[in-house]
Image (cartoon, coloured by chain):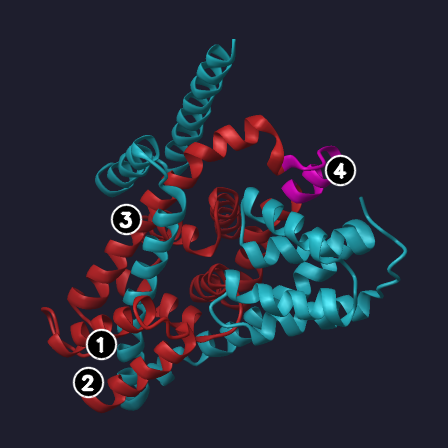
Amino acid sequence: MFYLRLMGVFFKIGLLTIGGGYAMLPLIQREIIDRGWLTAREFVHIITIAEMTPGPIAINAATFVGYRLAGVKGSVLTTTAISLPSLLIILAVSKFLTHFEDHPTVQKVFYGLRPAVAGLVSSAAIFICREVLFGSRNLTGGAALDPRLGAIALISFISLRKLKVHPILTIVMAAILGLLFLR
Amino acid sequence: MPKKDHQATYLQMFTSFFKIGAFTFGGGFAMLPLIEREVIERHKWVDRDEILDIYALAQSVPGVIAVNSSMLIGYRLRGVPGAIVASIGVILPSLIVIIAIAKYFEQLIANVWVARGMAGISGAVAALIITAALRIARRTIKGMDTFLIALLSFLLVTFTKVNVFYILLLAGLLGYLLRRKDAALHKGQEQ
């Protein structure tokens, strides 16, 4: 039953997303691309859309993947499934443990979990950058690194890291540069 | 524990969280200022100390921070139904916007100007994700031990087919063992 498998996969992604939205990207990459449900190129499209639209990136990405795979029903299923683990755990934790996050065992476990998330997100970041910059069928139609796209990525990086420009302004700037220089 | 004295109606909660979901770009931490404006300043549903506890807990359980925070605030206001109403409110704008885009995605991307704009944005997306990875690394890597855990999980997820669940399980276990050893050492020094 495809719908059940879809829900199962997104439930698992929601359960293993620790430390916020970007931590979900390596999981989507593993569960969805490796399963052949999406190509790496579609994955980049989805993240691009998710960054451009309001709302949490993880929810946006889940909705888009769900729609791609099974239409409106699919998007409602994946979005529900990805949020369900949080809801169940939060309800359980709020009921039985006050200050769950201050519990010594929780703190010890998180001492290891947090850097692991850094490792996972770095891996996804490299995967996404490789696909954006060297994707075999990228949007500009080139096979190798498009220097103009590389320049846009570099300018965006400097604007975000060094100049502390707001991400939305950086995205608008990148869109304008794309309109002007990519053809 | 749910606090019933705030008298937040489901409609008020739904509207507030819908607004939060509709007007924040970038998700996660970008959502927190708007959450604070709606929930603390406008409706006075929670106070500034409570919100810090809520963020801490929202980051300590799996899931998306903005959604987790909304669920927790909803739960404090009206129990389980409150948590459900708040999370549906915060998620619904994404769902509507993304379904609309996904529906017409093929036509949109066929337009040369849209394709160029999107290609430009994909460059910014590469930069955004590298920035996020660096930010998470800087916040979480505190010394050699945490660096090695990060490196180990990077290598495992990049070069092997090991399930992410087992990587996180291993990292949590390593963290527990490392901290327990540290705690034991501190105890030894005190005696």
- Mark 2 residue crowding within 10 angstroms, few (<14) / some (14–19) / many (20+): many
- The residue wearing badge 2 is A182
Label 4: chain letter: A
Q: Which secondary structure class fits the magenta region best?
A: helix
| Measured Cα–Cα span from mark 4 to mark 1 | 49 Å
- The residue wearing badge 1 is A152
Q: Which residues are magenta?
A: A89-100
Along the polypeptide, which appears first: circle 4 or circle 3?
4
| Measured Cα–Cα span from mark 2 to mark 1 | 10 Å
Along the polypeptide, which appears first: circle 4 or circle 1?
4
Which type of secondary structure does the marked residue at label 1 adopt?
helix
| Above or below, B89 relative to B57 | below
- Mark 3 residue crowding within 10 angstroms, few (<14) / some (14–19) / many (20+): many
Which chain can be seen in red? A
Q: In screen coordinates, is A103 left or right of A10?
A: right
User: CB under 8 Å between callouts 2 and 1?
Assistant: yes
| Measured Cα–Cα span from mark 2 to mark 3 | 28 Å
- Mark 1 residue crowding within 10 angstroms, few (<14) / some (14–19) / many (20+): many
Which type of secondary structure does the marked residue at label 4 adopt?
helix
For residue B43, which quarter of the picture?
bottom right
- The residue wearing badge 4 is A95
